Image (cartoon, rainbow, N blue to C red):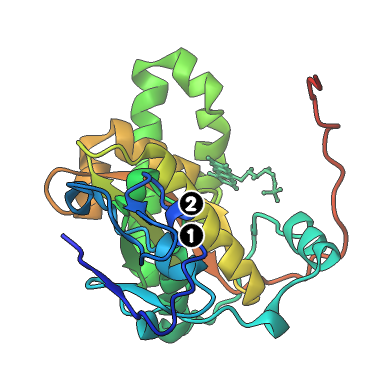
Amino acid sequence: MASLLIDGEKCNKCGMCVAECTYWLLQIVEKESLPSWVDGAEALCINCGHCVAVCPNGALELSTMAVEECAPIRKNLQTSPEQLEQFLKSRRSIHEYEENPVEHEKLARLIDIARYAPSANNYQPVQWLVIEKREEVKQLAQMAIDWLREVVENDPLFAELMRAKEFIAGWDSGIDVITRGAPHLIVAHAQKDSVPMGDGLIAMTYLELAAHSMGIGACWAGFIQVGATFDPALAQALRLPEDHLSFGTMIIGYPKYKISRIPKRNEAQVIWR
Ligand SMILES: Cc1cc2nc3c(=O)[nH]c(=O)nc-3n(C[C@H](O)[C@H](O)[C@H](O)COP(=O)(O)O)c2cc1C
């Protein structure tokens, strides 16, 4: 449970912290009084830190979140809408990778950025598995193929949906159709009884965009993900903590080729009212 610490010298009672609180837990009782908890609200604080983030004077902090622990926004690093548009539109799922691995520090930085993704109720349920060893990535790809062979045998419709026969044929001809020769695999996982599906996908998207900004390639590893959902052997091979499920898997590595154009996409289907 967080307690509220207000610096009376710095607080100008503007009320922004009150307005910005996710669950309306703060109040300014009288015009000249400092912000305080609504009765009993302290226990309901989700530690989202919006009150700390919005205060322009650094007047407010929580016992769980000191002002010094919350980096100031550096205006000189702000991206323009044009920069961001090109950045987002130029991200591609990368299909061919360089041999050289991504440095451990850079992988750690990706994870460090991804932990700032939004999560329902600020639960931050997503945890990470980073497979740095290429051989282990390859083993998982082999397991996904083994599972696809079983699917072809036992569930022809599902196999057709996943184009399993074509992927198996590609693998058998020596092409890594599952992990595309990428040196690393990152898995977002969470306790299965939490509510992490959306949280996992959003965190993965943050990770993919962070990778793009650092010149690192990424691509969803759909067959590892689906395999880990349906094949107990593949799920076990991930060796996630007990009661955890994978909510997204991505291959990671340096792109072999430079992307030169933004491919065309469907027009947005929008209902305007
Ligand atoms: C959930 C999901 C699973 C995916 N699985 C694979 C995959 O197994 N192999 C692959 O090469 N691409 C995979 N992709 C990448 C898509 O093919 C790719 O996003 C799509 O073709 C559009 O290309 P872009 O990401 O470069 O815009 C996956 C994407 C998503 C969102």
Quadrant holding ligand 1? top right
Callout 2, which amino acid?
Ala
Residue 107 x/y as whole percent: 44, 76
Horizontal side of 214 relative to 112 (left or right) equals right
Q: At numbered mark 2, what does the secondary structure look like: helix, strand or loop?
A: helix
The C terminus sits in image quarter: top right
Residues at marks 1 and 2, CA–CA distance in whole angstroms? 6 Å
Q: Give me the disc on residue 144.
A: none
Q: Is residue 137 above or below residue 271?
A: below
Residue 140 x/y as whole percent: 34, 53
**Beta carbon of the mark 1 residue lies under 8 A of ligand 1:** no
Horizontal side of 273 relative to 253 (left or right) equals right
Residue at 35 percent across and 81 percent down: it is: 7
Residue pointed to by mark 1: 15
Of residues 102 and 52, the one drawn nearer to the viewer in this rendering: 52
Q: At numbered mark 1, what does the secondary structure look like: helix, strand or loop?
A: loop
Residue at 52 percent across and 28 percent down: it is: 162
Residue 120 visible to the viewer: yes
Callout 1, which amino acid?
Gly
Q: Quadrant of residue 228?
A: top left
Residue pointed to by mark 2: 19
